[in-house]
Image (cartoon, grey):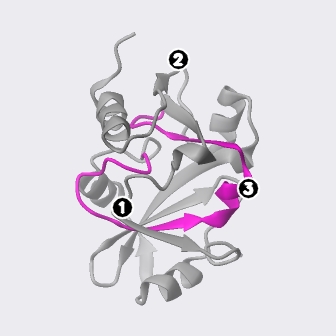
């Protein structure tokens, strides 16, 4: 099966990072963690959601969080050393190269400061978006994803990115 251009870019980034997994595109979109878990038959906590924020300096900040957790913006701001705010769709696409709902944890258009929720490490397998709302890939902790290929890896202590 041929992947869409966005999903293929993620597949290529995974291969370049040495992550052995395959992007799968489904017939139905999964724009939320709950929708993705329903499509994949896993728990919401196993979904690695990628959220992009805009720092006060204008720099993009990517938070890869468990789908079960809500990101605490004040705690993220403390980690990056400056206030952050929500990023609009145009900023997200400019920085990542992907639309909201399909942002993968790697293979972005430009380097992003990246924070990773340690709660994802509790699971043997996690799933992340693969470039479109219909595309996803699952991988084991042993493969290192969702942190493989991140431009800056900062693992957040439990409770740092969520309340």
Quarter of the picture holding the N terminus: top left
Pick whichever of labels 3 and 2 is earlier in the sequence. 2
Disc 1: CA contacts within 10 A as few (<14), some (14-19) or many (>=20) = few
Q: Secondary structure at mark 3?
A: helix
Residue at the spot 70% in from the left edge and 76% down from the top edge: 159
Q: Nearer the viewer, mark 3 or mark 2?
A: 3
Disc 1 from disc 2: Cα separation: 27 Å
The image shows residue 82 at horizontal and vertical percentages of 40, 89
Which residue corresponds to mark 2? 27
Tell whether 128 sits left or right of 94: right
Residue 149 drawn above or below residue 27: below
In the image, farthest residue toward the top: 1
Residue at the spot 63% in from the left edge and 36% down from the top edge: 36
Write down the region rendered in magenta: 104-133
Q: Secondary structure at mark 1?
A: loop
Residue at the spot 61% in from the left edge and 65% down from the top edge: 117
Look at the image and tell me whether residue 121 can be seen: yes
Which residue corresponds to mark 1? 88
Residue 31 drawn above or below residue 39: below
Residue at the spot 55% in from the left edge and 77% down from the top edge: 73
The image shows residue 38 at horizontal and vertical percentages of 71, 31
Q: Secondary structure at mark 2?
A: loop
Pick whichever of labels 1 and 2 is earlier in the sequence. 2
Look at the image and tell me whether residue 70 can be seen: no
Q: Nearer the viewer, mark 1 or mark 2?
A: 2
Residue 18 position by quadrant: top left
Q: Is residue 106 a member of the stretch shown in magenta?
A: yes
Disc 3 from disc 2: Cα separation: 29 Å
Residue 41 drawn above or below residue 116: above
Disc 2: CA contacts within 10 A as few (<14), some (14-19) or many (>=20) = few
Which residue corresponds to mark 3? 122
């Amino acid at each position: 099966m041929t992947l869409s251009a966005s999903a293929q870019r993620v597949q290529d980034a995974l291969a370049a990072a040495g992550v052995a997994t395959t992007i799968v595109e489904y017939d139905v979109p999964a724009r939320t963690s709950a929708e993705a878990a329903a499509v994949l038959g896993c728990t919401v906590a196993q979904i690695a959601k990628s959220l992009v924020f805009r720092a006060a300096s204008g720099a993009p900040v990517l938070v890869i969080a468990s789908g079960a957790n809500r990101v605490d913006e004040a705690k993220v701001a403390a980690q990056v050393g400056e206030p952050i705010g929500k990023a609009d769709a145009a900023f997200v696409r400019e920085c990542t190269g992907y639309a909201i709902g399909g942002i993968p944890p790697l293979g972005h258009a430009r380097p992003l400061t990246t924070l990773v929720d340690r709660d994802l490490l509790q699971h043997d397998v996690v799933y992340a978006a693969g470039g479109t709302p219909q595309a996803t890939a699952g991988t084991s902790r042993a493969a290192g994803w969702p942190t493989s290929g991140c431009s800056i890896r900062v693992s957040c202590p439990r409770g740092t990115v969520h309340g």
